[in-house]
Structures are given as structure tokens and as C-alpha cells.
Image (cartoon, grey):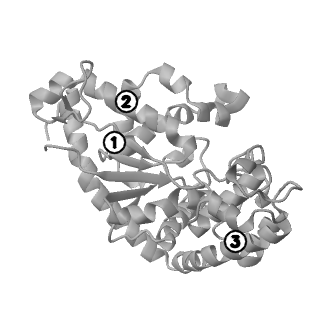
């Protein structure tokens, strides 16, 4: 091998209804990537148990529902690999190795653990603390070179790069001796000439990389928010979408004509960003059309756009969920294709680390 093969990896947790933030911040961005490089999209069900085990039937349903959303959004199972994480055991095995590569200090700096554990961190699971290492394993089990991420995941991808760099340095001699290295694309006096894992690059683009709550523009749109009015679920019908946008929190001022006018107006910035992302426009384009108008005029236009964009996807999700055999076939085929990539990579890692294999 003379260079890393361009490969994208990303995934979504099956922890309840997918919402507009998942779609605009992640899934919709994946679709065009399918024609640019090899793409692997995972339903990360191992991550779904880090904060507690959901009801088993609920987890199975949510796993299929996320898969249905992928397909309905335009992820093509003939172009991309779609599978659920727990079917490919290499994820968990590599995560354990990375638990021994990563440093406690690195994980202690992870802000998402602090946010999710809160004051109850002593009772949080080890899985919740260490899941960034599993995320690194998800990516590097395929030696993925690119990951489309939202702003809130950049820190975890930086950890993935740190883990890859430490592994490459710690096992530089073994990698070279076994002839398993790739020329380091970013050599320096501190790094080896041959490396095994790439330093995965983030892919962050577009006007709405982070979708915020419809009830509080300073908080991320979330499945866990107790108010259903805070989010637009991908299973919502047209009436529900219109109602939620109508009730979305705003301020009394008209929309500005320039993006600078959105500063210190989080709710206005969020709604303009949602419109821009759904329409494939920039925020400035939206303000060029609606600047100076009140939200009483903008909200109906946003509702119409959201319904037009999301309703066909919702209908297709319902169709797919009515034929679970089709979903299961996609997941089974995807797991086989994913395993075919990950298994030889983990075989290399075992040799590099020094595990004795007698099979």
C-alpha cells in the first residue's frame, strides 16, 4: 500500500426519534459524499447503551428506524455500506486496544462527558466516560480518512487523531518491521516515516452545522429534551411541523438584511440557518430575500419549505418500517461488507501489538 484510500465513516445513535438536527447536521451531508469517495455509514448501537440500557425492543426498533431514515434521506445501499455497529465485533476489540492507548487526561478534557454526566459523574458508566475511544475505533477500524462532523464532535475527532498518532509512534518499529506501514503524509522529526493509521480529517461545511432547539436557541436540538416542541422529528407530519415552527421562540425584531445582524439573536440565527440548510442557500441569501420582514411572514415560508423537504422522507420511512425484512437485509449485507474491511485491519493491529495468533 502506497497511500491511504479515501474513505468516509460516520454514524448516528439509535436513541429515539431522529430529528431535523440529525438530518441537516449529518445525514443530508452524507448523500453527496457517496459519489466522491467510499462511504461507510453506521447505526452506532454500542454507543446507545453508554448512558443506560434502553428497553431491548425499543433499541431494536430505533436501530431499524435510523436505518430507514438513512435510506429515505438518499443513502444508497448499493453505493454505501450501511450496518449496525454491534454486528461487526472489530469495533469493540479495537476500542479495548485504544482504551490502553488513550490517556486519562485526554478523556478528562472531553466536554460532552461533563455535560452528560453532570453532577452525577461518580455514578456514570465507564462506557460513557470511555466512549470517545470507541468512536475512534469506529473510524479507525476502517482506516477512514474523512469524517463529516458537527461542531460539537470536533473534540472527539481530535482525540481520534491523538490516538492514531500515539499508536503510530508507540508501534513505529513493529509497523516498519512487519511492512504494514504507509508513508506518513505529514512527516516531521517527531513522527515516524511509516504509519498505520491515518490522522482522520473532519469535514465541516454548510450554513447549519449545528441545529439548535426551537425553544432555546442557545441549546442544541436534542432527542432528550423533555419538550417535543423543541425539535422537529423526522416522523412528524405536516401539521406537527407547522405547529412547531409557529410556536418556535423568536424575538420581537424584524429579520436583519445582513448576517452581522444575527449576532446575539440565537433564535433568529437558528431559524435562518434551518431555512438556508433546507433550501441549499447561504444565510445571506435568505436574509437577502426576507430581511426587514417580521417572523409572522418568515415562519410560514419556513414551514412550507420544511414540509416540502421532509414529508417525502417521512412517507418513505413509514413505508420502510412497514417492511422490516428490507431493512434487515440492508443491515446484514452492510455488516458483511464492513467486516470484510475491518477484519484484515484488526488482524494487522493484533500483529503490530504483539498478540499471538495460532489460528
Q: Is residue 192 above or below residue 233?
A: above
First of labels 1, 3 by sequence position: 1
**Label placed on residue 163:** 2
First of labels 2, 1 by sequence position: 1
Q: Residues within 10 Å of mark 1 (few under 14, many from 20)?
A: many
**Left-right relation of 256 to 168:** right
User: In the rendered image, is residue 17 in sight?
Assistant: no
**Label placed on residue 236:** 3
- Is label 3 in a helix, a strand or a loop? loop
Q: Residues within 10 Å of mark 2 (few under 14, many from 20)?
A: many
Q: Is residue 56 above or below residue 346?
A: below
First of labels 2, 3 by sequence position: 2
Q: Which residue is mark 1?
A: 140
- At 58% across and 77% down in the image, what residue appears? 318
Q: How far apart, in angstroms, are the residues tagged by discs 1 and 3? A: 35 Å
Residue 86 image offset from top left, x and y in percent: 42, 51
Quadrant in the picture for residue 283: bottom right
Residue 12 image offset from top left, x and y in percent: 51, 54
Amino acid at each position: 500500500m502506497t497511500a491511504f484510500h479515501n474513505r468516509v465513516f460516520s454514524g448516528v445513535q439509535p436513541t429515539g426519534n431522529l430529528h431535523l438536527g440529525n438530518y441537516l447536521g449529518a445525514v443530508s451531508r452524507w448523500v453527496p459524499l457517496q459519489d466522491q469517495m467510499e462511504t461507510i455509514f453506521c447505526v452506532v448501537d454500542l454507543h446507545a447503551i453508554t448512558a443506560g440500557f434502553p428497553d431491548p425492543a425499543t433499541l431494536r426498533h430505533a436501530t431499524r428506524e435510523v436505518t430507514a431514515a438513512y435510506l429515505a434521506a438518499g443513502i444508497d445501499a448499493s453505493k454505501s455500506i450501511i450496518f449496525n455497529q454491534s454486528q461487526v465485533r472489530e469495533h469493540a476489540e479495537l476500542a479495548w486496544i485504544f482504551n490502553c492507548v488513550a490517556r486519562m487526561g485526554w478523556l478528562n478534557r472531553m466536554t460532552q462527558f461533563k455535560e452528560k454526566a453532570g453532577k452525577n459523574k461518580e455514578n456514570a458508566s465507564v462506557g460513557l466516560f470511555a466512549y470517545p475511544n470507541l468512536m475512534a475505533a469506529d473510524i479507525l477500524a476502517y482506516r477512514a480518512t474523512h469524517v463529516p462532523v458537527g461542531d460539537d464532535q470536533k473534540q472527539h475527532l481530535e482525540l481520534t487523531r491523538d490516538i492514531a498518532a500515539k499508536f503510530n509512534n508507540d508501534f513505529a518499529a513493529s509497523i516498519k518491521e512487519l511492512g504494514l506501514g504507509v508513508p506518513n503524509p505529514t512527516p516531521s522529526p517527531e513522527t515516524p516515516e511509516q504509519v498505520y493509521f491515518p490522522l482522520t480529517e473532519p469535514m465541516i461545511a454548510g450554513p447549519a452545522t449545528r441545529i439548535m432547539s426551537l425553544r432555546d436557541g442557545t441549546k442544541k436540538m436534542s432527542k432528550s429534551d423533555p419538550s417535543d416542541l423543541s425539535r422537529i422529528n423526522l416522523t412528524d407530519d405536516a401539521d406537527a411541523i407547522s405547529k412547531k415552527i409557529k410556536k418556535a421562540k423568536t424575538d420581537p425584531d424584524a429579520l436583519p438584511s445582513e448576517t452581522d445582524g444575527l449576532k446575539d439573536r440565537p433564535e433568529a440565527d437558528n431559524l435562518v440557518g434551518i431555512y438556508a440548510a433546507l433550501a441549499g442557500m447561504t444565510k445571506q441569501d435568505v436574509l437577502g430575500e426576507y430581511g426587514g420582514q417580521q417572523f409572522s411572514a418568515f415562519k410560514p415560508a419556513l414551514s412550507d419549505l420544511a414540509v416540502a423537504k421532509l414529508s417525502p422522507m417521512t412517507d418513505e420511512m413509514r413505508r420502510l418500517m412497514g417492511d422490516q425484512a428490507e431493512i434487515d437485509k440492508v443491515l446484514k449485507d452492510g455488516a458483511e461488507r464492513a467486516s470484510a474491511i475491518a477484519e484484515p485491519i484488526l488482524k494487522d493491529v493484533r500483529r503490530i501489538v504483539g498478540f499471538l495468533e495460532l489460528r
